[in-house]
Amino acid sequence: MTLPDRDALRARFPALSGETVFLDNAGGAQVPDRVAEAARRYYLESYVQLGADYDLSRRASATVDRARAFAERLCHADPERHTVVLGPSTSVLCSMLAREFGRTRDPKRRAVVIQDAGHESNLGPWTRLGDHRRGFEVRTWRVRPGDAAEVVLADLEALLDDRVAVVAIHHVSNLLGRIEEVRAVADRVHAHGALLVVDGVAFAPHRAVDVQALDADFYVFSTYKVYGPHMAVLCGKRAAFEQLTGDNHYFTLDAGAPYAFELGGVNHEGCAALLGVQEYLAFAAGRDPATDLDRAGIETAFEHFATLEAPLTQRLLEALATRPDVRIIGPAQAGRDRVPTVSFAHRERPSREIAQACNEQGLGIRFGHFYAHRLTTALGLDPDDGVVRTSLVHYNTESEVDRLLRAFDELL
Ligand SMILES: Cc1ncc(COP(=O)(O)O)c(C=O)c1O
């Protein structure tokens, strides 16, 4: 099957035809026309409350139900074993999860483990369980020092015992770009009877999420990084959700049901926009965008994205590796276990200066700690200056990468 090439995919993103070369996708991706149109259509044609029996309300309810079913397929949820909660952001969903665990009163499991190379939105909430009111012991699985910033499974082993309730990790660091071995972590965590919470935000734009293969108890990501609306998806095992109460009204609290965790309901127009993402993935997979995309189609779309991304990552990393004045932070090699999020620190020049000089040339990159504050500190970087990060996705082009590399050459 011939799939649409990069140009055909890129043409679906009207915002990319502007002046700025957009290389800041890990901050949030652009949306294809179908996403914007789907939200517009929803606003103009069925912007009413769900659950009533009149036509418009039925249509609105069907949109939200379809979006939830799409989110389930996007995660490869098994409807018997998993459920999906939709929320406003990954930060809110992680915070909600940690708060829920803070209420559980299992006297035997009073410790949590965090992996410190992640984004603060999945670290801070668990760390706060260590305050005097909640009294959890917080253990840190530390990133290894050195520019490769490795996360070593053997280091986790020493932190696990039967007091651990939850281990919180990332699938990909939004600064390092490496795909971590989540399944191996899950096996270790489960062997100690604990639950695994995975931040998949920096993974989900690049590869098909598969909660079954990963065996994660909770997996969370933000749809605005996956070419969609500003929302987030939390996919969890039903058995794991059933350990939590949820904060919704007493008459809606049905253990393990998504609504228990979706206060005030979900973003309806966002759900419509999410269905626009489904249409885009169908287009990328060479399928009919008018029908719901099955799991195989989702996997085809993401394999296609990975194939388009690989040469971009390689070009960028190879060029940076030739510069002795640059420290690549994260894996220096392209490969299947890497997404095109590439960070570096210059040995003499501040990251701020480099990023801002590129910005003046219309190159949309940025600098900083990217909320991986603990990581930048552990690596001995000044978090306020952090790294220069370039984050690409499948719609970026080799000529954009070349333009950036030329700018680096001139500047440095
Ligand atoms: C890896 C990672 N985790 C979590 C988040 C937080 O996501 P949200 O903005 O949806 O709260 C981000 C946002 O940049 C991220 O990159």
Image (cartoon, helix red, strand yellow):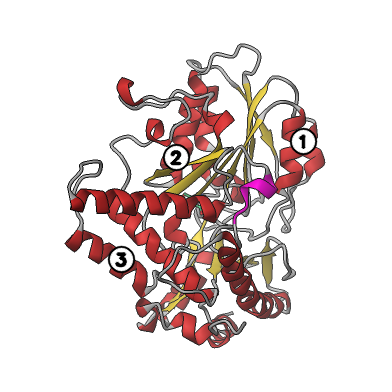
Q: Is residue 61 above or below residue 283?
A: above
Q: Which mark is residue 188?
A: 1
The Cα–Cα distance between marks 1 and 3, rounded to whole angstroms, is 42 Å
Neighbor class of circle 1 (other Cα within 10 Å; few <14, some 14-19, many 20+) is some
Q: Which mark is residue 383?
A: none
Label 2 secondary element: helix
Where residue 58 appears, as percent x and y from the top left, is: 25, 49
* Magenta residues, start to end: 209-214
Residue 400 in view: no
Q: Residue 169 occupies which quadrant of the picture? A: top right
Badges 1 and 3: C-beta atoms under 8 Å apart? Answer: no
Where residue 377 appears, as percent x and y from the top left, is: 60, 47
Q: Which residue sits at x=73%, y=48%?
A: 151
* Residue furthest to the right: 154
Q: Is residue 226 above or below residue 171?
A: below
Q: Residue 5 occupies which quadrant of the picture? A: bottom right
Number of numbered labels in the structure image = 3
Q: Which residue is mark 3?
A: 38
